[in-house]
Amino acid sequence: MSLEQFLQYVLSGVTNGSIYAMAAIGFNIVYNTTGIINFAQGEFAMLGGMTAISLSAFLPLPLAIALSVFLVSLVGALVDFAFIRRLGKPTVLNMIIMTIGLSIAIREVALHIWDEKVRSLPYFTGTEVSSINIFGAYISPQVLWVLGISGIIVAGLALFFRYTLTGRAMRACASNITAARLCGINTRNMVTVSFMLAAAIGALAGCIVSPITQTQYDCGTPLAIKGFTVAILGGLGNSAGAVAGGIVIGLLEAFSISVLPLAYKDAVAIAVLLIILFVRPAGLFGKKEAARLKEF
Amino acid sequence: MSLKKVIITLLCGLVMPFAFSCKKTGGDAIKVGAILSQTGPASFLGAPEAKTLQMMADEINSNGGIDGKAIDLIIKDSAGDPEKAISFAKQLIEEEKVFAILGPSTSGESMKIKGICEEAKTILISCAAAEVIVNPVARYVFKTPQNDRLAAERIYDVMKKKGISRIGVVSSNDGFGLAGKEQLEKLAPSKGITIAISEVYDKKATDLTGVLTKLKARGVQAVINWSIVPAQSIVAKNMKQLNMNIPLFQSHGFGNIKYVTEAGAAAEGIIFPASRLLIAESLPEDNPQKAVLVKYKKDYESKFNEDVSTFGGHAYDAMLILTEAVRKAGADSEKAREAIENIKGLPGTGGVFNFSAEDHNGLDINAFEMLTVKGGKFVKYEQ
């Protein structure tokens, strides 16, 4: 394999990996405050992309994306207000089933609002035919946007969780919800914030990948499955783990294509996931003790 | 006799006349079932097909039906799922007792219900392209889209003229993609083309840079992509992104202007075989298909406010053939089946149909025109 090809596979792997990582981070945020996997996470990305595409018809692109992210975060809040809060004493199982139901409902609503056709946002810079040469490997300028924005999201989240009161409160909920409540943290509100944050990140991810991957009413599910795989691989609830897991899966997929037929791409990723889970059941970066404490 | 039995007998007596009268009025309408993937990954096929059928049925009924018999169209949405297609086919045949079934939209679904319709002696006119649907011939099974083989031949002919001999093939892992891949691989040696690499991708694929990098490394002179899914636009975009400046050929699955819009500037110069519907207005006046193409395009676009696609055209042809047969032979499935086999020189959207007992598709290589994309529009490809 020549250096150019090697670099090309690396870039392809890292790009896909960072998309998976963003989906995984969405899972982790909700998981940390509620202990559940929000299976509607992929639909947030779809909604983000679709809303931004509709808004971009009469708004400048950055404004359309910002407004779309805001609207979808409201949808996230609504999901919590209308459903999660209403469950008196929810078990993990019925919360999970509820999110699966929600994901189906959101998909159907999107089908009725937007119809079944594929859409996409325009490229942020350049066009479909722009190509940037990096040491002999070629990428679309949009790939730089994807990498840049995911980097910013990860860094921003790290700062948010470390230095803001809300972020710290959410971390407190993650480590021990009863103790957090005893400290005077309104855990219910933290759940709402986590849904909003997860929805906003999902929506932003849906917008930045839309020019490359295109958006359709049912494009959320495959993304959610990959994101879930990555979240498990990195260790549920661990955002740095999600990034590492995403890049590991992305690179594995890319390099598996170079030696095996493309059809085995997903099989390779899942096989590696299984092996890692046999050796380290809590994921690459998950703590064993933490995993045992969770109900899930 | 107990009171209960008396009541039951009375009820039966009351209901029976209605049952008979129902059957009688039912005889005045021809029940036509349609199994289409209106939603799901193949929705871009099923949605325009369903709209087309509904539009045609309404038009026929408002003109007094076929010889006074109205068409009772029952559309079922299979969402592209072969299992659903099977259960809908059974339901339409056994419960609704339909006269004929139009669709399904995809080749995979069509193959699943081919045997069911043949066994039940129900006419099936498929809107899917794979040649295996009508080869081997099943007496009651027909299809309207052109054979994959013809499309593959047209593509190879253009390649030969351009001096291309070493190519890479990518196709989707659904019925359409796999059937096309098979035809391309079968025909290549006889046309002097070497397929250096042939890869299959998931029909929901959103990124194909990996596999295209592999193609690029093999030094191919052109790429053929064979699929009907949105990945068609992604292949075009990814190739430009990877700076692959070799010609991209697509299958007749590319015949939807939506894919050109999605691929934007990356779509320019894509060469693909398609039916003449896409260039209806620019056809010469003496073309036998012109009248039907222009009418369908105008009716569809004014009614639904969206661009016509060749897929809707396949449904148009299916309904056209069925009504032609019923007009000639009446609503008797055996006679209508024979009438379809005797249709000659019927201009449809996909080409001029000439059926026979051996040929249940009725189209030849002239059904395809090679098109290309210029300025975001489909135009005839000139070598």
Image (cartoon, coloured by chain):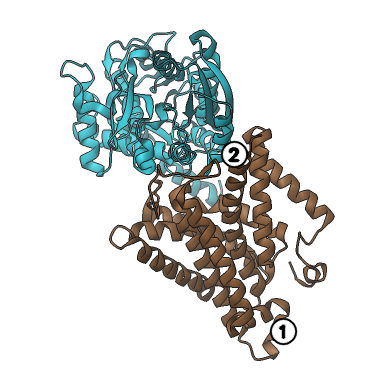
Above or below: residue B107 compared with residue B189:
below
Which circle's residue, 2 or 1, is located before the other in the chain?
Answer: 2
Horizontal and vertical percent for residue B270?
38, 30
Q: Which secondary structure, mark 1?
A: helix
Q: Color of chain A here?
A: brown
Left or right, residue A267 beside residue B37: right
| Residue at the farthest front position | A135
| Res. B18 in view | no
Q: Which residue is mark 2?
A: A4
Subunit bearing disc 1: A
> Secondary structure under badge 2?
helix
Residue lying at the far left in this picture: please name it. B285
Decide which of A13, B184 is in the foreground and name it. A13
Label 2 to label 1: alpha-carbon separation: 54 Å
Q: Which residue is at 63% across, 49% downward?
A: A250
Judging by the rendered image, the residue that carries numbered circle 1 is A178
Q: Position of residue A84 (x, y in %)?
A: 57, 73
The answer, for residue B170, to whether it is visible in the render is yes
Q: Position of residue A169 (x, y in %)?
A: 63, 83
Report the amino acid beneath label 1. Thr
The hue used for chain B is: cyan
